[in-house]
Amino acid sequence: MKTIIIANRLPVKIERNGDEFDIVRSEGGLATGLGSLDTDSDIYWVGWPGIFTDDKDEKKEITKKLHAMNFHPIFLNEDQIENYYEGYSNSTIWPLCHYFFSFIEYRADYWEAYQEVNTLFCSEALQFIEENDIVWVQDYQLMLLPKKIRDKKPNANIGYFHHIPFPSYELFRVLPEREEILEGLLGADLIGFHTHDYMRHFISAIYRVLNLNCNLDEVSLDNRIVHIDAFPMGINYEQYHNAPNLPEVKEKSKLLKDSLGDREILLSVDRLDYSKGILHRLNGFEQFLENNPQYHDKVSLAMIVVPSRDTVDIYAELKAQIDQLIGDINGKYSKLGWNPIYYYYQSFSFEELIAMYDIAQIALVTPLRDGMNLVAKEYLATKCNKPGVLILSEMAGAAIELPEAIIINPNDTDQIENAILQSLNMPENEKKERLDKMQKRISRQDVKKWANDFVVELLDIKALNREILQKVVGKRQLDQIKNAYDVAESRLLLLDYDGTLAPFVKNPEDAVPSKKVIELLKKMNADSKNKVVINSGRNHQILEKWFEGLELDFAAEHGMFYKENKTWHKNIPEKIIWDEEILNIIQHTIDKTPRSFMEQKEASLVWHYRNVDVWLAELRSQQLVNALIGPCSRLNLQIVPGNKVVEIKPPEFTKGSEVLRRMDKKNYDFVLAIGDDTTDEDMFRVLPPEGVSVKVGNFSQAAKYRIPLQSSVVPFLTNLIR
């Protein structure tokens, strides 16, 4: 088994050295985490090497050197770099995911290039992906790739991790290619995000855009389940925590202290990007200087901005605005020997960055939107000599893990000013207490744990999907069931109706049995060895009407009524008089939930919400269940959440109790139960060990077999009795 990491960039730096190329392995967070996986398997990388060349010999030389490192390069031409990377990835998806709607650029050639490059990555990876390999796709540049691999390798073990925010549905829906993007991601078995908020947004998009059923953190597809989970990415904690004591770092720290003077240093470290909130931060710091002159000559902001895309108009304009604002602030407030802001528009080496972390008493990390933000964690990890204070934007994913930081809204300059004042005046013991709690957390949730947690869960999900696949009724499974059916002398066939024999329709009154279903039931019932029972939640009047003329047995309202020997029987002594409090609770829910309605049966009440928006339905169904718990407990009534329904009924009778009643009356050597709802699992659980239980639709642990689509039920039963 191999582990294959597919990312936009390979973890290498390639530099021309005359006629040759020097290749140095980079030690970024992702490379460190994935390089520390607890696995004996080889780790392969697929990605762009970060260099452009049209020369075939140069490509050959680079490829040879990279293959020796288990790296497989994807060479992009200039148009692909422009339209796939700078275009769709960073001018469409990036601003969309960071909530900068007005910066989104839509161009057909961007989308075409994005599809083309995702296909290139797929073609390269498929050359060496084998059946049991782990394939882990990284980030927003490759969102089509999981499905492309799945289409060619249907049994592949595929994970995907999204390293940036995932936007709310209301923003995501503006993307013209939203369906293709989501379908691409659902090629994975496990989709990971930094936070549960991003998970929630993604799941919301799935059921609104694709109209797929989502059960908490699972999306059910025809033959497998896709899991969505949060894995907060960490850093190499030990590396950062020990780094301030390295001799070369100590030397650089001393030089920085001498250069910046004996002042309180606020530190800001960002890549040049509009999502980082750099201008807001500068405005907040200027407000602090204006309102607190007592701190002049005592506090400085060291601002590191790492160059990025500054030839792109938006970024060039941002760079000009930053330069102008810093110049204005320094021009207004600086004194002889003191600058309010020390501005570094450059990349820092690891040792230089650690030295800057080391001397800074306060870190100002205030992005307007950020997937995680590892700078915050790196700063905290380095504070081993003296406590530091972290001011952190609530819009950064890291804020969920670091509540002991001073959490602010980065759009509010008052909050930035007040946070700086709070940091400067914080007692040393409070600084240490806050820092200790955060360090303890990030030292445990490090990048190694992030990577291994993801892979362990991916393997668990693959095992579950393998079980799901084995349960799906194919030729082998059908032959097994049919062999048992054919040799049996006495058979009990228990069939659910809605979602099993008939598809769900918007209006339950329209779910009349089709001619095919009627003909099938007649044929099943004509065999003297068969006892055919429709075991349904429907009321007995409508079942009697729909199947008039068929000498079938029925169980209605989950076993509260049953028909046997052409006669209906009642399991409850008298009609239930429903409590006014329960009726009022349901009516209140209907009033607040358009397109929902209540069905009142003789022995149960049902709230239907199959035509309600999914998010609202989930909210209202949970609210309804919570509101009903009290009165139903007092009256000894059962609350049964089902498929697009919530039902209230007496607890003594279920679909399972009806199965037990029939099996007590007669010995059957073949028992089959088929249904799609949670209430049908009551049947599955009481079947004898040799019984045949078939779940329609979603996976069920209680069922032996699964038919993914309702439309396959009639063909299955037809083949069974043939």
Image (tube, rainbow, N blue to C red):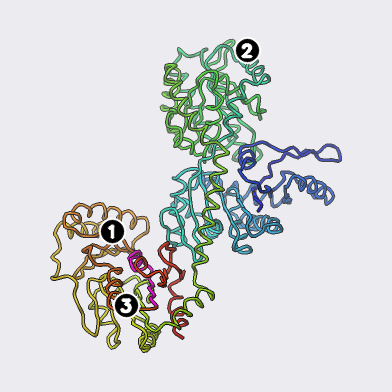
Residue nearer the viewer, 530 or 5: 530
Q: Earlier in the sequence, mark 2 or mark 1?
A: 2
Q: What stretch is highlighted in magenta?
A: 670-683
Is residue 35 in the magenta section? Answer: no
Per the image, the residue denoted by label 1 is 593
Per the image, the residue denoted by label 2 is 258
Is residue 677 in the magenta section? Answer: yes
Secondary structure at badge 1 equals loop
Residue for point 62% across, 59% down: 149
Mark 3: which amino acid?
Ile
Residue nearer the viewer, 486 or 721: 486
Q: Earlier in the sequence, mark 2 or mark 3?
A: 2
Per the image, the residue denoted by label 3 is 534
Q: Which residue lies furthest to the top in this view?
A: 336
Alpha carbon of mark 2 to alpha carbon of mark 1: how far? 67 Å
Occupied quadrant, residue 34: top right
Secondary structure at badge 3 equals strand
Q: Which of marks 1 and 3 is nearer the N terminus?
A: 3
Residue nearer the viewer, 43 or 228: 43
Q: Which residue lies furthest to the front in this view?
A: 667
Mark 1: which amino acid?
Thr
